[in-house]
Amino acid sequence: MKTLDQLQQVFDALPYPVFVKNAQHQWIYGNKAFDGLMAGKDYLGKDDRDFFPADQVKVFWTEDNRVFAGEESINEEEIGPDIFALTRKVPFKFPDGSTGLVAIILASVTTTETLNTTKVNYEAEIKKASVQLQRLRESSARRAVELEDRLSLAEMQQKMTMTMAKTDSATGLKNRLGFESDLASSVQTYGAKDRRFGLAIVDVDRFKQINDRYGHPTGDLILKTVGRRLTELPDVFTIARWGGDEFAILTEVHSDDPTIMLEGLEEARKYVFRPVRAAGRKIDISGSVGFSIFSEDAHSADELMRNADVALIIAKRSGKGMVQPFNQKIRDGLSRRMQLARDLPDAISNGDIRPFYQPIIGAENRMIHAVEALSRWTHPKYGPVSPDEFVDLAHECGLGTELDTSILNIACREVAAWLEDGTIAYLSVNVTPTEMVACDFAERFLACLARTGTTPTHICLEIVESAIVGNLDAARTNIQRLSEAGVMIALDDYGTGFSNLRALLDLPLDKLKIDRSLIEGIGTNYKVADLLTSIMQLAKTLKVGVVAEGIETNLQSAFVTSVGCDLMQGFLFSRPLSYDALNTWLSADQQQIA
Ligand code: C2E
Ligand code: CA
Ligand code: CA
């Protein structure tokens, strides 16, 4: 395989300008000679309309379209006032199947130049020019043959494919591969000169919704427009489509003052994400940017990309539509995450991550009915770490199964006596959403129950809606298997997502757990009362029990009881407690609730 460098060397060594256009007529590659012809203009990602009058564009594009349709052409084109070029165009198939073209400018001649220098005999000079043109045409036909000898079309195709491998055919910008090679050389050259440059990852906010709402052609147009506007920014020296709705750019950094720099980036962001005209209407778009500076924040390409990526995630989380530079706070967060990731495997296998138990209370008798196991990790350096943080991390590190299994193991053993003597009716456990779709999940879960001697009917598995809705078939198989074995299934965090009712009706659900965010609205948001009432009706229809989560006040407790909720859970009754604390609570506090 030849590398792009070799390929570019081949084209750059040619005395003829060579360029490549995609099916949208955009230039996506030009060799050195073509750069020269374009007099240093930045043409990549642009098309003829950016440089030529409309009627000339029409001529070019008619020709292009013929080539896209499969013809080869040799044509004389007027590429400037009185500048003629003899151009050979051949069709070219991109790896994604779309058709573009490769063009070789075999000769160009300026008739006015000839005229101006002599200024004597117009007639004669024009004649001379046309003879010259004719000669050039003939010699270029010869050159074309020569060229084809030196570089067979097949070979060219193969070489172009390699260039294409670094080009995003939809936008004509570089793709990730092309970007990474640019980034690597920037790190070298800027690093050698001890100079700084910035990497920004630019993301179109809510692009999926735009696509769903206006259709894919409009979505594509928006991506192209964003890509084009990025090319119009000053100081930007590399632009790539990073994938999906993300772009990456490399830019000069002039100011040392972070405030000024941020203002500049914000201005650029506003310029790129101004409304787009598409299909006869104005579409508002917004975008988020993560930014990191070489060699201030990072000393390698990898680190720089990671920083900008993390900054982007934070920009998205903080409400989108903003520029987030990488900073010390983010660095601290990252090093915490890395430290936690390093310590996680041991923490799981040593049982340092342990279940706490939160009582689930019967709405009628106000007695404990069940417990939910919630993991707790007290880290030697960081103190208590929230499961929201480490459950996610465990999944990322491929330790989701280990974590869930370890918690299930410990919890089953610890609560065995309470289950036996009827203190509680069941133990509720959580599952990492992505685990639900593993093909052997149900079997592993049941095997774990068998090992600890736990009766499946004593266990309730809490799953979140996203785990079901995204992968209904895989989740359904597991759920059905578990349900047949007697395990109860609860739908956790109900009311936070877009409930797919049909999917729910299909599943053997035993319980709905109403999310705390809904319970919070009781007494303040009048719509919540209606919503909870209708959820109760739905639950009755489905014949499932309802657990209200996050009960913190007597008002909330009274309300959910009044609409027919069976079970409650929340700080009003008890926080999640360690095994020992729960033992104490069971003997003392239990009386107070009643
Ligand atoms: P979840 O399953 O929805 O658990 C309920 C969360 O709400 C728990 O947070 C609990 O401490 C908290 N909570 C309970 N009552 C109240 C209340 O009255 N007010 C407020 N403000 N909060 C209340 P926690 O323990 O931080 O767990 C967070 C999430 O982490 C859980 O949400 C669950 O999805 C996940 N999780 C916890 N342990 C495990 C585990 O062992 N495995 C897996 N896969 N996920 C777990
Ligand atoms: Ca839960
Ligand atoms: Ca929940």
Image (spheres, grey):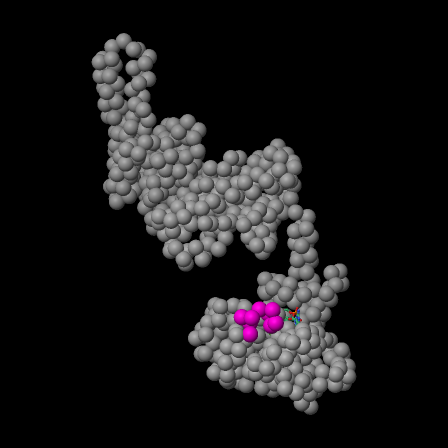
**Residue 37, image x and y in percent?**
38, 27
Of residues 532 and 503, the one nearer the viewer is 532
| Residue 203, above or below 441 | above
Of residues 284 and 4, the one nearer the viewer is 284
Q: Is residue 263 among the parts visible in the rendering?
A: yes
- Going 63% across and 44% down the picture, which residue do you hit? 298
Of residues 450 and 76, the one nearer the viewer is 76
- Going 50% across and 77% down the picture, which residue do you hit? 534
The image quadrant where one finds the N terminus is: top left
The image quadrant where one finds the C terminus is: bottom right
Q: Residue furthest bottom?
A: 421
The quarter of the rendering in which ligand 1 is drawn is bottom right
Q: Is residue 150 among the parts visible in the rendering?
A: no
Q: Residue 554 colored magenta? A: no
Is residue 446 left or right of 72 when viewed as pictured?
A: right
Q: Quadrant of residue 228?
A: top left
Total labels: the figure holds 0
**Residue 424, image x and y in percent?**
66, 86
**Residue 501, image x and y in percent?**
45, 74
Q: Which residues are magenta?
A: 521-529
Q: Quadrant of residue 487?
A: bottom right
- Going 69% across and 52% down the picture, which residue do you hit? 332
Q: Residue 526 colored magenta? A: yes
Is residue 505 left or right of 590 when viewed as pictured?
A: left
Q: Quadrant of residue 451?
A: bottom right
**Residue 17, image x and y in percent?**
36, 30
Is residue 297 left or right of 316 when viewed as pictured?
A: right
- Going 45% across and 44% down the picture, which residue do you hit? 227
